[in-house]
Image (spheres, rainbow, N blue to C red):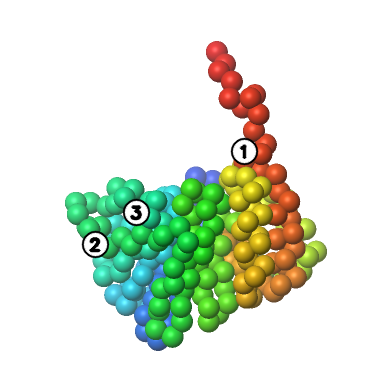
């Protein structure tokens, strides 16, 4: 995980985590972010894997903080991008000329497995959390669920390396998560369906794209108990939010 590559941008950019998975000389980047992080990320990842050995990019959805530097990655590597089929015709707008031709793989709504040498990375449905076509990525060897915006917290980069391990840790951190989830998650129904799915998975760590990460079932299940009851997004909107004012 690379978590401090936008720290010099101050309040002008949201903090974002980028993830490199290396398996027997092949690599995958999960939510590699935008132009602000590209150069720093290339340098940081080089001690683990030269970018020429990068095989895949995985994007949870289409936002610029997820995949804004797509053109640079496609120009400088031979990797392909996996993203929801809903966004597969939109993300080429980040690219010059025909650089994305044949290199964008649309993930079907039900998800799919992608093999990376001695592990498999599964695209896991997380639709409407927060994008209409949205995926998380699960590495079946490390048992890590890379959860995108779900579980995100708005914290200082210096705090991110302190994992959330217990129920008490989670509730102490909740004030950094609550407002984000209430606005960026679309509805309680989507939260409940997602939580039911994750409870049936073997997840040892849950690592979001922003903020601190969760280690162990106590912390992860505390989060699931909270989010499955969360009123958010359209649950909170009324006619007052759709009123024309002069």
Q: Give the x, y percent position of residue 143.
A: 58, 77
Q: Picture coordinates of residue 184 (x, y %)?
A: 58, 45
Q: Which mark sits nearer the N-terminus, 3 or 1?
A: 3
Label 1 to label 2: alpha-carbon separation? 37 Å
Query: Which residue is at 78% across, 65% downward?
Result: 167
Q: Residue at x 27, y 69 (%)?
A: 77
* Circle 2 residues within 10 Å: few <14, some 14–19, many ≥20: few
- The residue that mark 3 highlights is 88
Residue closer to the observer: 240 or 45: 240
Q: Residue furthest left?
A: 97
* Point 38% across, 51% down: residue: 87
Q: Dot 3, how many residues are within 10 Å of its Cα: few (below 14), some (14-19), or many (20+)?
A: many
Q: CA distance from mark 3 to mark 2?
A: 11 Å
Q: Is residue 177 above or below residue 208?
A: above
Residue carrying label 2: 102
Q: Are marks 3 and 1 in contact (CB under 8 Å)?
A: no
Q: Secondary structure at mark 1?
A: helix
Q: Which residue is mark 1?
A: 234
Q: Is residue 119 left or right of residue 200?
A: left
The residue nearer to you, when weighing 228 against 11, is 228
């Amino acid at each position: 995980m690379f978590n401090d590559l936008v720290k010099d941008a101050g309040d002008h950019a949201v903090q974002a985590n980028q993830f490199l998975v290396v398996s027997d000389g092949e690599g995958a980047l999960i939510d590699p972010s935008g132009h602000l992080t590209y150069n720093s990320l290339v340098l940081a990842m080089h001690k683990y894997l030269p970018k020429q050995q990068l095989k895949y990019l995985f994007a949870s959805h289409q936002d610029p903080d997820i995949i804004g530097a797509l053109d640079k990655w496609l120009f400088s590597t031979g990797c392909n991008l996996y993203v929801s089929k809903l966004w597969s015709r939109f993300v080429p707008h980040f690219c010059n000329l025909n650089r994305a031709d044949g290199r964008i793989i649309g993930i079907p709504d039900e998800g799919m497995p992608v093999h990376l040498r001695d592990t498999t990375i599964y695209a896991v449905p997380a639709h409407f959390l927060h994008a209409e076509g949205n995926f998380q990525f699960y590495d079946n060897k490390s048992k890590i669920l890379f959860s995108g915006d779900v579980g995100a917290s708005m914290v200082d980069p210096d705090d991110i390396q302190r994992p959330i391990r217990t129920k008490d840790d989670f509730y102490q951190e909740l004030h950094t998560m609550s407002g984000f989830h209430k606005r960026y998650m679309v509805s309680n129904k989507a939260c409940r369906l997602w939580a039911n799915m994750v409870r049936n998975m073997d997840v040892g760590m849950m690592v979001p794209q922003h903020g601190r990460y969760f280690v162990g079932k106590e912390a992860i299940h505390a989060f699931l108990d909270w989010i499955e009851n969360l009123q958010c997004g359209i649950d909170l909107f009324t006619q007052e939010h759709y009123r024309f004012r002069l």
